Image (tube, rainbow, N blue to C red):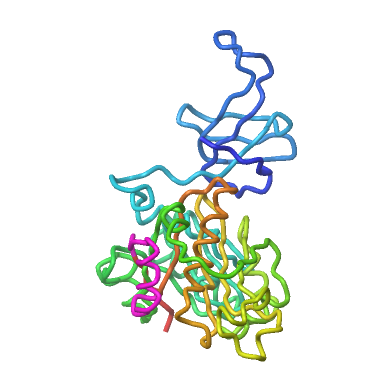
């Protein structure tokens, strides 16, 4: 298992982790000076952290930690690693890949609010138990969003094509007047499959910073909310921003418009949020004037390749179920449908 020199103080509590740390004394049998602890990062203070392993809690001094990384949840079914995760666990994995201005929890449920910017940034992920009777939990959620002048919204997951009314929570929400919409597919893949599908193309710029040109171009793709948009885009444990920008002799290669050829404004964008041991692809966009040239595929493959340096081997993305062109693109690259979800919004 490859470990990355991550700062364990930045890994969210509740994450599944592997922590390598120095022993106070070498092991008598092997003379080993290092050991690994795998489990859930349950607590942390200024001097120690606790990992809940299969053999019980392990308390580790921060000063003894050499490397640490988030790792995916354990597979729950047979198949390729990117498909072997349960639907609930994939929902958990996807949470850190998209930011939010504000996060809270109700039991195991995750509540997110971002001044209305994106449905993902303003919805509940109702996975696990809320720690309350279901109807009481829904009332608590509604009050939480009402305090932020937002409608309550639930991202309810299930198999592809599932009926929200067949789920106990979904049935309750529909009875309360919630509207079912924005049905979305969860696609997953192996990093190496996507990287190998690169059709080739112009130079790709990858960086950790949300630059002005990237953000200005992104604002052309959808309605944004100043302040909230930046917080959401930056709000993953690790983020990579990818773009393709005119220059470097691309005018002839791409048939660039004269107005674009000498500019620095990106003509293709993508974002990769890294968390829970997975890379989450999003914000993929190509200037309409340059679509059909493989830029989105090239950019996606470049981001997949960048995950090697992160020690992350699995990817996910979300695409609306009726976005046929995008689904065709991602299937060609090697993504497969894992599950789906729908938003149930308070009426």
279 or 173: nearer the viewer: 279
Residue occupying image coordinates x 57% and y 41%? 42
Residue occupying image coordinates x 50% and y 62%? 301
> In the shown orientation, is residue 288 left or right of residue 180?
right
13 or 149: nearer the viewer: 13
Q: Position of residue 45 (x, y in %)?
A: 70, 40
On whether residue 61 falls in the magenta region, the answer is no
Residue 180 in view, yes or no: no
Taking 97 as reference, is 179 above or below it? Answer: below
Residue occupying image coordinates x 48% and y 75%? 152
Outermost residue on the top side: it is: 28
Taking 234 as reference, is 218 above or below it? Answer: below
On whether residue 337 falls in the magenta region, the answer is yes
Q: Where is residue 52 in the image (x, y as percent from the top left)?
A: 52, 35
227 or 44: nearer the viewer: 227
> In the shown orientation, is residue 151 left or right of residue 76?
right
> In the shown orientation, is residue 282 left or right of residue 67?
left
Q: Position of residue 324 (x, y in %)?
A: 34, 78
> In the shown orientation, is residue 107 left or right of residue 329?
right
Which quarter of the figure is the C terminus placed in? bottom left
281 or 127: nearer the viewer: 281
The boundaries of the magenta stretch are: 320-339
Taking 24 as reference, is 143 above or below it? Answer: below
Residue occupying image coordinates x 35% and y 56%? 87
Taking 22 as reference, is 317 above or below it? Answer: below
């Amino acid at each position: 298992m490859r470990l990355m020199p991550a700062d364990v103080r930045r890994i969210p509590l509740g994450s599944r982790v592997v922590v390598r740390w120095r022993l106070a004394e070498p092991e008598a049998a092997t003379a080993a000076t290092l050991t690994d602890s795998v489990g859930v990062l349950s607590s942390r203070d200024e001097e120690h952290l606790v990992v809940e392993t299969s053999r019980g809690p392990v308390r580790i001094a921060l000063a003894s930690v050499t490397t640490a990384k988030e790792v995916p949840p354990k597979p729950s079914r047979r198949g390729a690693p990117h498909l072997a995760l349960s639907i609930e666990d994939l929902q958990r994995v996807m949470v850190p890949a998209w930011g939010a201005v504000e996060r809270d929890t109700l039991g195991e449920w995750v509540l997110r609010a971002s001044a209305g910017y994106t449905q993902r940034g303003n919805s509940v992920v109702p996975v696990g138990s809320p720690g309350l009777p279901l109807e009481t939990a829904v009332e608590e959620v509604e009050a939480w969003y009402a305090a932020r002048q937002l409608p309550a919204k639930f991202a309810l997951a299930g198999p592809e094509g599932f009926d929200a009314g067949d789920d106990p929570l979904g049935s309750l929400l529909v009875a309360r007047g919630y509207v079912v919409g924005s049905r979305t597919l969860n696609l997953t893949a192996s990093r190496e499959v996507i990287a190998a599908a690169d059709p080739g193309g112009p130079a790709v710029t990858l960086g950790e910073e949300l630059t002005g040109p990237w953000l200005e171009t992104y604002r052309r793709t959808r309605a944004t909310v100043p302040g909230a948009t930046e917080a959401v885009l930056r709000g993953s444990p690790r983020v990579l921003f990818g773009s393709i920008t005119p220059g470097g002799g691309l005018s002839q290669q791409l048939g660039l418009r004269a107005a674009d050829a000498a500019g620095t404004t990106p003509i293709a964008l993508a974002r990769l949020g890294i968390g829970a041991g997975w890379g989450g692809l999003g914000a993929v966009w190509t200037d309409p004037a340059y679509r059909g040239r493989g830029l989105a595929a090239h950019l996606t493959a470049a981001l997949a390749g960048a995950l090697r340096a992160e020690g992350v081997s699995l990817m996910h993305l979300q695409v609306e179920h009726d976005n046929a062109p995008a689904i065709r693109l991602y299937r060609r690259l090697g993504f497969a449908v894992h599950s789906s979800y729908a938003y149930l919004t308070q009426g």
